Amino acid sequence: MSDEEKDELRQNLISRGYTSLLEYDELAAIGITLFGTIEAASLFGLKPNELFERNIRICARTGIEAVYDAKAVTYGLLLSDFIIKHVPDKQVVVIDPFLGSGNFLYSMAKYTKGYAAFGFDNSHPVYELVVANYAKLNFNAHVFFDDYANVSERVRPFDRTNLKNEMFVIGIAPPWGNGFDFKTGLNLNKTTPPCKHLIETYTKQFADLPIVFVIPLPEKVHEESLTELLSMASFYQIFYKGTRTAVLILTP
């Protein structure tokens, strides 16, 4: 499939918004289009047919930008390796300000053995789907129907008295929207909101606490926007897995 045809599929699903659910054949088409196989469109460790058997659904708008297992598992493993190598004594709290499918938070929490998980989405249909899906998966997370700007005020009241040496891992995966096409890749300054703004926001909100940002990267990234993000870091590392999966781990 050409880049133009992929972009057409992407725009079609985006236009359907957050109230239209993906059907099985559409999820299968995403797997084939993005990764080459139907099974690659797995979520929560479940293949597409298993998701539908358990009535675990996602909406069309989320579906085209979801962090599927084909990448989410790798991100989780790379993050786990990073923590073991650099901060093995930390108790991890994971946060996803843009839940979408919920799979990015699920994978970060699973592979880091996170002490607690917090997820946010300002779309009520997405929020309701994630809550329902997590219940079917028996995944215990604090999920809020709220805006990304309110993360700190929601997380800070959480009882952390049992955390002796905490570290907050914040996933930065906002909607790509017009910031992405298959030919030129992702412009990190044109996501909704821009990744730079998010890093600035959470660096201020968690200024008194240790934080690490985890940013999924597609195969192609706008170099200038990536360079600008890296300039904000006191430490960063880009982990590559093959040619199609990369993740940026950054500390402010």
Image (cartoon, rainbow, N blue to C red):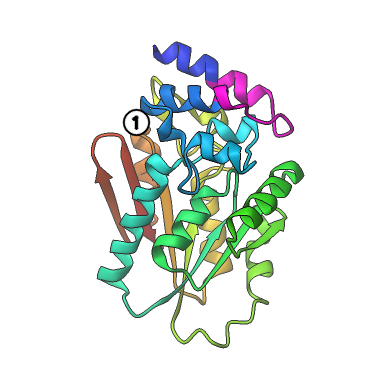
Q: Is residue 38 left or right of residue 102?
A: left
Write the residue at 45% across / 73% down: 210
Write the residue at 34% across / 63% down: 80
Q: Which residue matches tag 1?
A: 220
Q: Residue 29's spot in the image, x, y percent?
A: 49, 22
Is 158 rendered above or below residue 194? below
Write the residue at 49% across / 43% down: 43
Q: Amino acid at mark 1?
A: Lys
Is 141 rendered above or below residue 181? below
Tag 1's secondary structure?
A: loop
User: Toward the viewer: 44 or 120?
Assistant: 44
User: Toward the viewer: 227 or 117?
Assistant: 117
Q: Does the magenta portion include 11? A: yes
Q: How many marks?
A: 1
Is 166 rendered above or below residue 23? below
Can you say which quadrant of the picture contains the C terminus?
Answer: bottom left
Q: Residue 201's spot in the image, x, y percent?
A: 57, 58
Can you say which quadrant of the picture contains the N terminus?
Answer: top left
Q: Which residues are magenta?
A: 10-26
Q: Residue 178's spot in the image, x, y percent?
A: 55, 27
* Residue that lies at the very extreme toward the front in this rendered image: 53
